[in-house]
Amino acid sequence: MRPLAIIALALILARVFAEIWLNRLNQHHVRAHANEVPRAFRGIIDDGTYRRSVDYTLAKSCFGNIVNLFDAALLILVLFSGVLPWSFGRFSASFGTSIWAMAGFLFVTGIALSIPALPFAWYAQFKLEERFGFNTTTMKTWIFDRIEGFLLGALLGYPLLALVLKLIAWTGANWWLWAAAVVVAFQLLMLLIAPAIIMPLFNKFTPLLEGALQERLFALARRADFPTRSIEVMDGSKRSRHSNAFFTGFGRFRKIVLFDTLIAQLTEPELESVLAHEIGHYKKRHVIKMLSVSIAGVVTAFAAIAWLARQQWFYRAFGFEHQQGFAAANVVPAILLFALLAGTITFWISPVIRGWSRRFEYEADAFARVTMGEARSLIQALYELSEKNLSNLTPHPLYSAFYYSHPTLLERERALQIGA
Ligand SMILES: [Zn+2]
């Protein structure tokens, strides 16, 4: 094994050990609090519900360990068995090295590598979620979702890949800048068209019915200086009893989406506070900020790929032949290897990314408190949602630092009360 291959192997193992260790840490933490409802939640959450939230957390955690181990084993097998250079050679020999053939290789490889994860996705939905009463997806919907996702990938992803590869021949040494620009433009386009064209393929969106709730929410939007023409209800109950609200698109195309499950679970003042929180994300420019981070990520990724594509040692370490020159076939192995390995490095910066995300949540909460003129409705909504979703009420701090995009219930309550 070449030194670089050993480093790659070490990175994969380091990540999977860290994932399992964090999981164990969290399991111990949850078990340590499992015997009785923690003091902060007494009188709010009953014994039975708390017990179920502990069981749900532990079941997900065990399952997560298996998935992490499997992913690492698969990655090691794929990277070090020689299957990648072998299939690349076979593919090029059969279909040539044209742009469309090379994009086809990346696309087919991506699909092939996602297939082993399907049984896990099936188990998570129909066994784990089912056991805790969350699953409402039918087998038909599940299969349909996969087929639709595949068709979308073929229709949008494949041409995008081909265009990126075309840019290598067209623009030479600076191809990665052009490629990053094209991918960012594509992301922006998706942000615009996804709410109107893609999301309706998977879910039904209906405007919130006229009535007291609608009036209340529109009044809030006006008060928050967020003129909106539509608040829509999504049939989240088609797949799961988990509830959510989100905000999508920008400018004229922005819309607020509430899950039907959320509307069923919360009272009107609570829903109003959730909407205020969502508007807070917009008002505090979180969409633009997240987008800037993602653009920086895309540019960095392409710069790294372009650099790696020029390194003979990088190709040789994973069994690929290396050739200089700006041709798609010379860059495709670098794209593939980067896609497989990048996660072993980004994993370590996830606490930073999640930290940002949690800061945004505090800001949106604070905005909601100011707009509502009180914090109680939002706190109640958060409690209600935690209970209905069987959220882990006692995550280990290090675990939540790595994985939680939202602060924990107690952290949010504390911040809301201090600000009040
Ligand atoms: Zn939020």
Image: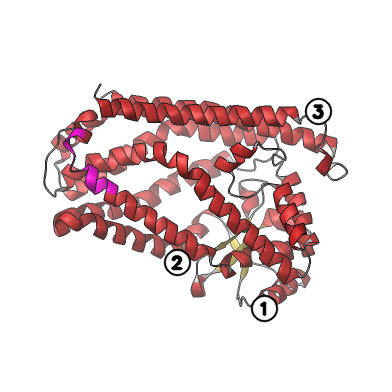
Q: Which residue is mark 3?
A: 35
In three-dimensional space, the C-alpha distance between marks 3 and 2, rounded to whole angstroms, equals 49 Å
Q: Are marks 2 and 1 in contact (CB under 8 Å)?
A: no
Residue at 46 percent across and 39 percent down: it is 348
Question: Mark 1: is the Cβ under 8 angstroms from ligand 1?
Answer: no
Does 291 sit above or below residue 318?
A: below
Q: Amino acid at mark 2?
A: Leu
User: Which residue in the protein does label 1 denote?
Assistant: 222
Q: Quadrant of the C terminus?
A: bottom right
**Which one is nearer the viewer's eye here, 240 or 144?**
240
Say which mark, if any, is on residue 419: none
Q: Amino acid at mark 1?
A: Arg
Tell me which corner region of the image, top left, top right, bottom left or bottom right, holds residue 387: top right
- Between marks 2 and 1, how big is the CA–CA gap? 23 Å
Between label 2 and label 1, give the one nearer the viewer: 1
Q: Is residue 304 above or below residue 129?
A: below
Note whether 86 is above or below 397 in the view shown. above
Q: Is residue 127 magenta?
A: no
Q: Nearer the viewer, mark 3 or mark 2?
A: 3
The three-letter amino acid code for the residue at tag 3 is Asn
The x and y percentages for residue 370 are 72, 69
Q: What's the residue at 53%, 67% (across, down)?
A: 285
* Depth check, front residue: 369 or 185: 369
The part of the chain drawn in magenta is: 304-313
Q: Does 268 sit left or right of 156 as displayed?
A: right
Q: Nearer the viewer, mark 3 or mark 1?
A: 3
Looking at the image, how many numbered discs can be counted on the residues? 3
Q: Quadrant of the N terminus?
A: top left
Q: Is residue 21 left or right of residue 116?
A: right
Say what secondary structure mark 2 lies in: helix
Decide if residue 344 is in sight here.
yes
- Which residue is under mark 2? 192
